[in-house]
Image: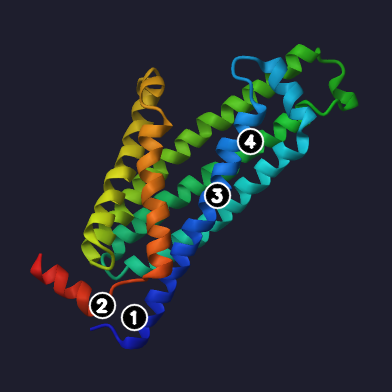
Amino acid sequence: MTTPTADTSQSRTARVAGLMYLLAIPLAIFAEFYVPTQLIVYNNAAETARSIMAHERLFRLGIASNLLVFAVDVVLITALYVVLKRVNQNLALLATFWRLIETAVLVVITLNDFDVLRVLSGADYLRVIEIDHLQALAGLSIGAHGAGYNVGLLFAGLGSTVFCYLWWKSGYIPKALAGLGVFSSFLLATRTFAVIIFPDLADMVTVVYYGGPIFIFELTMGFWLVLRGLRSYRTAELEKISA
């Protein structure tokens, strides 16, 4: 049996996880959707370079937002592990490590964004390189960011699938919500992995299809944990017994 004190601590940690979901979503949307749509001209490295240098502050805000997202994600992952390790510690550890791999990959690819600024800075040591070559190098760094982000999404989907399975087994949240999490997380992982092998799928299965469900789940999950918290330990146990 879980003591009342431990149960209260677990509920508080779950609310922290919910708050982290809600904090990460707007920051990620700003960094990975708003900023690129404002600055990146696809298939035109020269225009993209000019746009970035004309709005360097916005580009830097995108970098800063991503770094905040990654910091928030570490808190989220830790909170999820603390809440769900009682369901199955081994699976909770597996999910935690997958999500930490995701975060580490995404932190590393942020260095490519700094490379873009460095290449386009106009520093004296770069004047020996023709401007169109510099613009092409910046384009390569931007492309590397996108490729690395997809790798991160693969591990995000894997880790989230396992965490959501543990939510479903725990009974701490409605099974319908946990089921949506399992489905949307697995969809994210499988789509990302499939695109590595079949890149043409990226044009057919766009972000609306694989990103929409996980966005709805994480937004709903954030509000649920913050506003409702965990179901009582006794309620969760009764659900597991009846299942």
In this image, 128 relative to 193: left or right? right
Closer-to-camera residue (20/145): 20
Q: Residue furthest bottom?
A: 4
Mark 1 nearby-residue class (10 Å; few <14, some 14–19, many ≥20): some
Q: Residue 25: horizontal and vertical position, in percent?
A: 51, 50
Q: Which mark is residue 226?
A: none
Q: Nearer the viewer, mark 1 or mark 4?
A: 4
Closer-to-camera residue (133/242): 242
Q: Residue 127: horizontal and vertical position, in percent?
A: 87, 18
Q: Tell me the kind of residue under disc 3.
A: Pro
- In the image, residue 223 above or below residue 160: below
Q: Tell me the kind of residue under disc 4.
A: Val
Q: Residue under circle 4?
A: 35
Q: Secondary structure at mark 2?
A: helix
Q: Secondary structure at mark 4?
A: helix
Q: Residue under circle 2?
A: 233
Name the image colouring.
rainbow
Q: Residue at x 37, y 45 (%)?
A: 214
Quadrant in which the N terminus is drawn:
bottom left
Q: Tell me the kind of residue under disc 2.
A: Tyr
- Give the mark nearest the N terminus, 2 or 3: 3
Distance in Å between CA atoms under marks 2 and 4: 43 Å
Q: Residue furthest right?
A: 124
Mark 2 nearby-residue class (10 Å; few <14, some 14–19, many ≥20): many
State if disc 3 and disc 1 touch (CB < 8 Å): no
Q: Residue under circle 1?
A: 7
Distance in Å between CA atoms under marks 1 and 3: 30 Å
State if disc 2 and disc 1 touch (CB < 8 Å): yes
Q: Nearer the viewer, mark 2 or mark 3?
A: 3
- Give the mark nearest the N terminus, 1 or 3: 1
